Image (cartoon, rainbow, N blue to C red):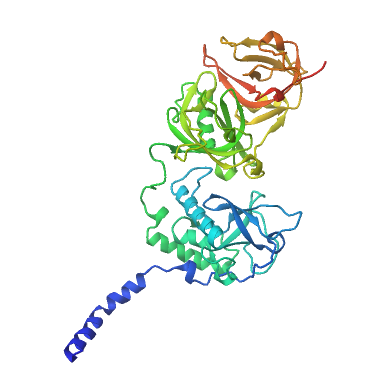
Amino acid sequence: MSQSKLFASLLSLTLFAPALLLTSCNSEVDYVHDSNVKLTLDYKDKNFFEDGIGQVDLKYAIDGDTAHFEPLVRNQDDPTVIKSRFYGIDTPESTGQIQPYGKGAAKFTAEKLQEADEHGTIVVSAPITSYSKPSFDSTGTRYLSLIWINTEVENAPFDQLYLLNLWLVQEGWSNVKGVNEMPDYADTFYEAEAQAQGLKKNMFSGEEDPEYNYGGYQDVSLLQIKREIEKSLEDPDYVNPYSGAKLRFKGTVAGFADHILYIQDYYSKEQGANYDEGEWAGINFFTGMSPIDSKFTKPGTYLEVCGTATDSELFGFQMTSGKFLSFSDDEDNAKVLIPASENTEEYALKTFAMSGKELSESKTRYLYSPVTLTDTVTVTGGYDSDDGDSVTLYVEDALGNRLPSIYVTFMYRPDADDYLTIWNSVEDFKGKTFKVSGIYGYHKSQSSSSVSYQIIPRNDADLVLQEV
């Protein structure tokens, strides 16, 4: 190189050095892979339930900051599943109160966990610096967890694992929340959050979430729907904003009868429940007259469903026009998120046992949830439907208290072993005494604006004839 060209090159570097330095200062920091947030405990042969750390396989990615894992090391009496609530972060909701960027956060978590599960390593630890038993979160069912992954190396050394919790913050999928139990990590978490805000990543972009249904199907929770139903029941003139809307939500199957799928979900006080112990909300979904796959109807199955909301004179506010196709991957097709046989705790079906009088006084508290009356009831009257397909029974308890009516939508067999005897009119039931279970719903009178509450047995087993 000539001296003149060398001088020109050096001059160019000198002139542009401030710009290069500025670019370097403004470059994005990869806190996940380059920071001091590293796992310092070996996970090999460790039992999460005893040591607070252990290698796992992915079972379910529930949402952005919740997942279920299967421990590779466990004692015979240990749980078979680790239900983890990610420590130190708070992603937008995608299962309860649906929020923008919730689906994106859930997708990011699922993709990273699935990649690590298939090609690399997943380790779950409590927020600890020495081996000790893990702690539950406020629900008492989920463990506060740090999720360490390597998406490429199987059984990776513990110092080659990276913290998914921090990764979600760095990519703008989560705020930092309650990270102070790990002070050595706190500064890095807040720096990653500030960088994501500065770079306007995802939830900090100030733009509409492309994954959120601002139009088309609207992501809602059953609790949001319940609140609007309650307003409609209190004020007959109130216009439910969801009426006619296309909605998508998640919930647990509470029952299936007469082409109606009853779906229930739980919400904590933080998610808007009216009660300190939380609250259940539900809905009924008319699935159409064609048969649907039994995988969608088994009680206890946790689903995501789409449909159109409508006000029904007979069934109250309900969903219709859903797709329940076992072979379809369309976005609006019903999806089994957790099969009934595996849905044992967090999203498990809840049945409420109480006296008929207590249920009558509860109003909408247990709306569309399964209930079992602890006392027996006697049929005093009722009426048959015009088409003969259902019977409404008026009932009282032993003290003569009028209770919610019983709405029977099937031909009832009083004796499970007798296939020939079928009851399908009020006269068949009148004067008889029963133990009753079913879905707690309501009925709007077609001739007036009055509302009456009812129990809807799902099958013969929900209506047990008592010998007197």
Residue lying at the far front in this picture: please name it.
327
Question: Quick check: 2 above or below 152?
Answer: below
The residue shown at (58%, 22%) is 258
The residue shown at (43%, 37%) is 218
Judge left or right: residue 123 versus residue 207: right
**How many circles with numbers are drawn on the protein?**
0
Among the 4 quarters of the image, the one containing residue 200: bottom left
Judge left or right: residue 105 versus residue 361: left
Q: Camera-side residue: 278 or 287?
A: 287
Q: Is residue 202 visible?
A: yes
Q: Position of residue 108 (x, y in %)?
A: 47, 54
Residue lying at the far bottom in this picture: please name it.
3
Task: Look at the image and tell me in which quarter the C terminus lies.
Answer: top right
Residue lying at the far right in this picture: please name it.
468
The residue shown at (50%, 45%) is 94
Q: Camera-side residue: 291 or 89?
A: 291
Q: Position of residue 161 (x, y in %)?
A: 55, 67
Q: Position of residue 152 (x, y in %)?
A: 51, 65
Among the 4 quarters of the image, the one containing residue 431: top right
Task: Look at the image and tell me in which quarter the N terminus lies.
Answer: bottom left
Q: Position of residue 61 (x, y in %)?
A: 55, 51
Q: Camera-side residue: 47 or 90?
A: 47
Q: Is residue 176 visible?
A: no
